[in-house]
Image (tube, coloured by chain):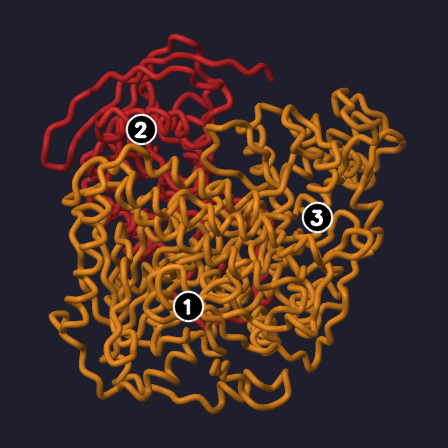
Chain colours: A orange, B red
Amino acid sequence: MLDSKIPAGTLDQKWTYYKGHCKLVNPANKRKLEVIVVGTGLAGASAAASLGELGYKVKAFCFQDSPRRAHSIAAQGGINAAKNYQNDGDSVFRLFYDTVKGGDYRAREANVHRLAEVSVSIIDQCVAQGVPFARDYGGLLNNRSFGGTQVKRTFYAAGQTGQQLLIGAYQALERQVALGNVTMYSRHEMLDVVVVDGKARGIICRNLVTGELERHFGHAVLLCTGGYGNVFYLSTNAMGSNVTAAWKAHKKGAYFANPCFTQIHPTCIPVSGDHQSKLTLMSESLRNDGRIWVPKQKGDKRKANDIPEEDRDYYLERRYPAFGNLVPRDVASRAAKERCDAGYGVGTTGQAVYLDFKFNLINKYGRAEANKLGIQNPDTETLMRLGKEVVKEEYGNLFDMYEKITGENPYEVPMRIYPAVHYTMGGLWVDYELMTSVKGLYALGEANFSDHGANRLGASALMQGLADGYFVIPYTIGNYLADDIATKPIPTDHPAFAEAEKSAADRIHNLMNIQGKQTVESFHKRLGKIIWDKCGMARSEEGLKEAIRDIQALKNEFWSDVRIPGVIEGMNPELDKAGRVADFIELGELMCRDALDRAESCGGHFREESQTEDGEALRKDDEYAYVAAWQFQGEHEWSLHKEALTFEIAKPSQRSYK
Amino acid sequence: MEHYTMNLTLKIWRQPNTQSPGRFETYPVSNISSEMSFLEMIDVLNEQLIKDGKEPVAFDHDCREGICGMCSMYINGRPHGPWQNNTTCQLHMRAYQDGDTITIEPWRANSFPVIKDLMVDRSAFDRIIQAGGYISVNTGSAVDANAIAVEKDHADAAFAAAACIGCGACVAACKNSSAMLFVSAKVSHLALLPQGSPERKSRAVNMVAQMDKEGFGACTNTGACEAVCPKGISIENIARLNREYMMAGLSAD
């Protein structure tokens, strides 16, 4: 049933074989083919630019006021690539292996290997575009290390790597706009996919300024619309990040894969109160230089700097001596939750742990600088000062951000951090060519499920977004469109367009006509609380069943009592938000069902019933080595398709970072 | 840091759309925590307005971590409010005291027409980038990344210029509504790198031409842009743009 279309050949030859054998579209025919790209983050902008360069007629859409604002821009720490510039033993194979292992053996080997292969070209491409990666004094590129790996393969631009990569892709996109190959539609939100004779042939979208619904034809449609972390209400996602495009595609026949695989990032600024609208990440790269600890005594109320070394529990270093503070994200998050639940948490809420830079400021950076300057026997103050200068260059913007949000200076006192929802590994099911289960409908970047299994390693999201957009889709889309060169553009008065537009319009009218009492925001908060409590860092059968009931009840309440002010004609951000929250509610139910089905612990999915004696996640390969691809059947109804995962090269073992 | 709550008076610019005239409306908000961000305070107001059956205040915002460049409020006469090197979304309410009155306007510039309330249309910036704010390299034609060595000083300076988030505060602060800081940041970023060198002349000329076409005013070196830039983009970049522009003119064919 599910054909993942993995090419023949040995793992390291599959992509080469594919590229050598896929169908091509000649330049004259490309000009006749129209491609719709929804979303302009790293995946969307790189895809739109690359397809425009190839000669396709591209229409790109984003809900923000400019494609440059997509949330990829907020990625901080870096982008992985198997360049081995540091001569520390890295290779394509190692990056592949680390990613499969880091994903807890729930990703597709062939996709991950391709990702590792193209990673090297991404860095070349970005540098050529002028992305200002960090460099050494010799003028060559610098690297840092990230969680779940033992090599330095992460390229970075201070704490603003995502911004710099996105601006590179955005500039490439705007160049194609100037050349007339891409037409850009900003402040537009996709509300449906138009399917004609079983193939995706266009979209319906709302012009967020005028409120009008628009019909757009495309020979193929690419969804590059990011993840669904905002289902939790509080997450590190941007306020506008939403699942609507992917969810509409799901309801039109695209399977949704592994929705319960969500990543809770260990190092975020803790919640400060009920007013909280979003959470802010402190890059994982900080774990290179920060040590995580809590007091050894429960409820120790002393200030962090007053707690002496012997009263501190560096629990990651204690539990995982091999990887220490650089264990993968899922492991670090659960360990923080464990300490806080046990009563060792710090701060006013007790829901935080310390991330402390003092040791490395002094001993690592301070001493290195002192040596460079030839300062003999420097005192602690000098070491601190010298260390600070280096850290400022590496992470200055992050430290500033922390200070603005909390009012505390992290150079002086340890940061307080706590895990927060950050990324969603699940997403639309795609085959090797990134095509969903609807022909001609593709999903790229975080919107698909394919490369990160049950847990994504740091600095791999940027890699995947750009891999999909720059180096995968330009080949795979040709293999599909080569058979479509005779297809004339379908006029948008075709009944399928009219029907899709009518259903979008009806839904908007239904929402506006409820005229209830509760705000959209209040529903979103309640949904988030249900999912965070019962489908967050720890999940149980009982809790998930409760959550499903709660979400179904919430859905009924939403559709009978939500209040949306304003009118349909014209700009109405509350109406836009209502549509998104309505979709999140439906997705939330599916997440819980998926989490219920998967009675094992793997990666970010921790089922309380499935753990080892010392509280580590217990994976069950004999029962659950599959991708759970859910097909929408009707309200509250889905059927499950299982894509078996086979591991020819990276043989599954219980992950150990001890 | 001591937490406190406050009651405030907000004077906010309300304008239904580009065509209609706008005016200030006054709203009281109470029980605002010093821990809130400025936009969370606006969220509180909007929830209240919706409950009272009124239309909430429309404003641009997205990442709320100071990097996407979408938020754009002119607060008490200053883009992004009172803090240095800061965006509105990162401004926190501990900047204010109980009883304060805060006036909030959209960016004011002819080239940034108001769409609704505090939202403006900044698509002129995209069109300036389209005029030349890129390096012409198609996907796949790059050489190995380490084949191009870049002097660290140049790389760092290019990075500092590339940190621009395109929010438009520079334009909003400038009495001439000049976009020189924005344009010069992009021209500098690319001119400082060897990869950007082949197109540096046409880039400077074309971007400046587009800036003029969009109706942005001239630069008179007051430095207001630098003072409010959330990313600390230096007006040295404007000097560099002027040099690039002049060199392009001097060496024109």
SS type, badge 2: helix
Q: Residue at x 79, y 54 (%)?
A: A323
Q: Between disc 3 and disc 1, whose residue precedes?
A: 3
Q: Residue furthest top?
A: B99
The C terminus of chain A - image quarter: bottom right
Q: Which residue is mark 3?
A: A332
Q: Is residue A360 left or right of residue A83?
A: right
Residue A492: image location, x then y, percent: 14, 70
Chain of the residue under the numbered disc 3 shown in the image? A
**Mark 3–mark 2 distance (CA, rounded to whole Å):** 37 Å
Q: Give the structural element (helix, strand or loop) at label 1.
A: strand
Q: Are dots 2 and 1 on a single chain?
A: no
Q: Are marks 2 and 1 in contact (CB under 8 Å)?
A: no
Instruction: Give the amino acid type for the residue marked by disc 3 in the picture.
Output: Ala
Residue A443 tag number = 1
Discs 2/1, front:
2
Question: Which corner quadrant of the image does residue A115 belong to?
Answer: bottom right
Q: Name the residue tied to disc 2.
A: B46
- Helix, strand or loop at disc 3? helix
Q: Position of residue B198 (x, y in %)?
A: 41, 62
Can see residue A45?
no
Q: Name the quadrant containing residue B58.
A: top left
Give A104 or A341, whichever is nearer the viewer.
A341
The disc labelled 2 sits on which kind of residue?
A: Asn
